[in-house]
Image: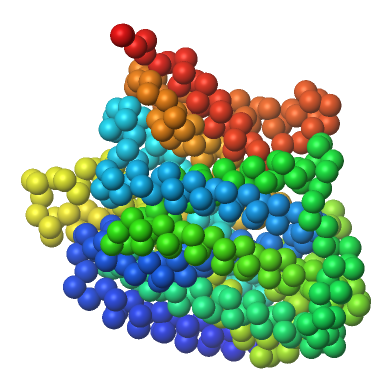
Amino acid sequence: MTSNLILICVIVYSVLLFGVTWFTSRGADNESFFVGNRSSKWYLVAYGMIGASLSGVTFISVPGAVGIAQFSYLQVILGYLLGYLVIAFVLLPLYYRLNLTSIYSYLLQRFGNYSYKTGAFFFILSRTIGAAFRLYIVVNVLQIFVFDGLGIPFFVTVSIFIALILLYTYQGGVKTIVYTDTLQTTFMLLSMVLSVIFIMDQLNLNMDDLYNKVTDSDYSQIIFKDWKLKSFFPKQFFGGMFIAVAMTGLDQEMMQKNISCKTLGDAQKNVLSFTFVLLLVNILFLILGALLYIYVNESHINLMVDVHGKIISDNVFPTIALNHLGTFSAVFFIIGLISAAYPSADGALTALTSVFCIDFLGLKDDRSKTEEGKTKIRHTVHLTFAAILLLVIVIFKLINNDAVINNLFTWAGYTYGPLLGLYAFGLFTKKEVHDKFVPLICILSPIICILLNENSNQLFNGYKFGFEMLILNGAFTFIGLLTISKKTTS
């Protein structure tokens, strides 16, 4: 596939996206930006959330990681099911009962201002890193396969994508993203399904053959029983449960879309339907990953390796789709890839702007400023976070040496852990805390976890932490909050 054809795909898709943006952002105000005027259709939110949850990480990293970790990621997805039930029946009722625009306002009501700002800060840190990971993987693929050949630096490529995302979220915010995520989810899933079909055709497989080929391969192991491994089933299952709670239920980006639904019932229908569709979609991505490696082995294809001779798993799907399955496959891969790129940052940029404006600037309830004045401030914050996101992605380009899916969840364990501990303490105890000490607890907990993770081999007889690090981090935060809790008087 030529670079010119890829550029045409990018341009045509972007024009379509901006057409949707223009239509949906007409008459948008600050309330539209923050919560979509609380009028979003639940089924559109549910469908669009699939793309926002999957993003480039699932599109590229999950299939690529099958060659290393087999189907172990399915253990995480099964844990998601429990996590989303907690979101639907514990967290969403809380958010709707308190009529929250920023979900971190709960911490203000429950503990005080220091806890409130701490929760909002950890979201900003978590979402900035997470969005950078997600967008990086997509832009990096385009850089390697397209823009390097044109002599365009990585910094320029990222700048272009962020500028486009900035433009189409600038006015409409959540009101626009609900619709653009729907469009992007459609193209991403279409690309994935067609890739499976194209590889099946190359391997002369029908549906029965597909099942046998995958299950008989070396890539289909799901359950792992070695307790020392990161892929040990309880680690992955319960880690997945708490990842769902933290990265969706305690994440303003994801919840901002949910609380834009008219009623709690609609929001719950959204989460429950989204849960089971997400399970199915991830299974299909794992099947795609197995097919990719089967095709590589049977066709004797040489894959990209790093300086240590290790296969670069994030480049496996792009290599096959762009270089070995024909032009039609390559076109749909690029469309799917672009569809994965935009949701990686559009919702994050909107949510980061919302949290900073509401939780740090108090913009929503500030009666001293006109609507026009608030809009100007929101635009400035939006531009600032776009610049920060650009900087983080460029830094990550310099230091990344692992599959993005692993990096993403590792950092989530460190940055979402304090949020998990704060909300668990607030929901499951009636204790008050010395609010001014909460930031210290929430900083110390990740530091302890980082030290444990770095020295786990020596300290715990070869044990390696996996996704359970998030649970441990939340537990340390919970215990820390107990130590600074106030004595209750009868």
Horizontal and vertical percent position of residue 114? 33, 28
Residue placed most toward the observer, 209 or 29: 209
Is 206 situated above or below 236? below
Residue placed most toward the observer, 49 or 383: 49
Which quadrant holds the C terminus? top left
- Name the residue rendered at 22%, 59% in the picture: 31
Residue 389 in the figure: left or right of residue 106: right
Residue 369 in the figure: left or right of residue 163: left
Horizontal and vertical percent position of residue 488? 34, 11
Residue placed most toward the observer, 423 or 434: 423
Residue placed most toward the observer, 306 or 362: 362
Is residue 150 visible in the rendered structure shown here? Answer: no
Please say which color scheme the image uses.
rainbow
Is 131 situated above or below 410? below
> Tag count in the figure?
0
Horizontal and vertical percent position of residue 256? 36, 55
Q: Which of the 4 quarters of the picture holds residue 166?
A: bottom left
Q: Which of the 4 quarters of the picture holds residue 55?
A: bottom right
Is residue 339 visible in the rendered structure shown here? Answer: yes
- Name the residue rendered at 70%, 74% in the picture: 318
Horizontal and vertical percent position of residue 426? 40, 30
Which quadrant holds the N terminus? bottom right
Is 123 situated above or below 436? below
- Name the residue rendered at 81%, 36% in the picture: 228
- Name the residue rendered at 54%, 69% in the picture: 340
